[in-house]
Image (cartoon, rainbow, N blue to C red):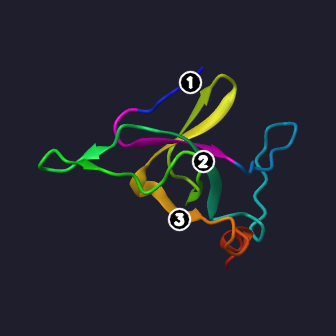
Amino acid sequence: MQVKPLRDYIFIQILEKEHVTHGGIVLNHKKDHPKARKGKVVSIGTGKRDDKGNLIPFDVQVGDTVLIGKHMGVALKVDNEELVRVTNDDILAVIDGRAAQADSFFHRE
């Protein structure tokens, strides 16, 4: 099923999962625990309008790999796929595949 968010919302599929034990306990290894999450933009809404009614374009496109804050967004489950709903303002950065490894963003102290 194709799901499209409304207004200025963006659906992101998280690419890195949290470490969870079989009993459901989330492991928090402070040194390895990311401060941001990496995800792929799977769908974008129609956009936000300014005071004059002009459409404000999104900073991302479907297919972009992005960084969002660890606790940003609202978790959703659509057709057994886990997504996070964020706004354009919640996205910290767009990761360029040719740039340095994205992991360097995750493990800064």
Type of the residue with mark 2: Gly
Tell me the quarter of the picture where residue 80 sits: top right
Mark identifier at residue 93:
3
Magenta-tinted stretch:
6-14
Question: Residues under labels 1 and 2: Cα distance?
Answer: 15 Å
- Placement of the C terminus among the 4 image quadrants: bottom right
Q: Secondary structure at mark 1?
A: loop
The residue under the point 34% across, 52% down is 57
**For the residues bearing labels 2 and 3, Cβ distance under 8 angstroms:** no
Q: Nearer the viewer, mark 2 or mark 3?
A: 2
At which x and y percent is residue 52? Answer: 11, 49
Crowd rating for badge 2 (residues with CA inside 10 Å; few <14, some 14–19, many 20+): few
Q: Main secondary structure of the magenta part?
A: strand
Please give the residue where the numbered disc 2 appears in the rendered image: 63
The residue under the point 51% across, 52% down is 72
Type of the residue with mark 1: Gln
The residue under the point 13% across, 50% down is 51
Does residue 69 appear in the picture of this structure?
no
Tell me the quarter of the picture where residue 82 sits: top right
Please give the residue where the numbered disc 1 appears in the rendered image: 2
Type of the residue with mark 3: Ala
Question: Residues under labels 2 and 3: Cα distance?
Answer: 14 Å
At which x and y percent is residue 76? Answer: 57, 32
The answer to whether residue 85 is above or below residue 93 is above
Residue 72 relative to residue 27: left or right: left
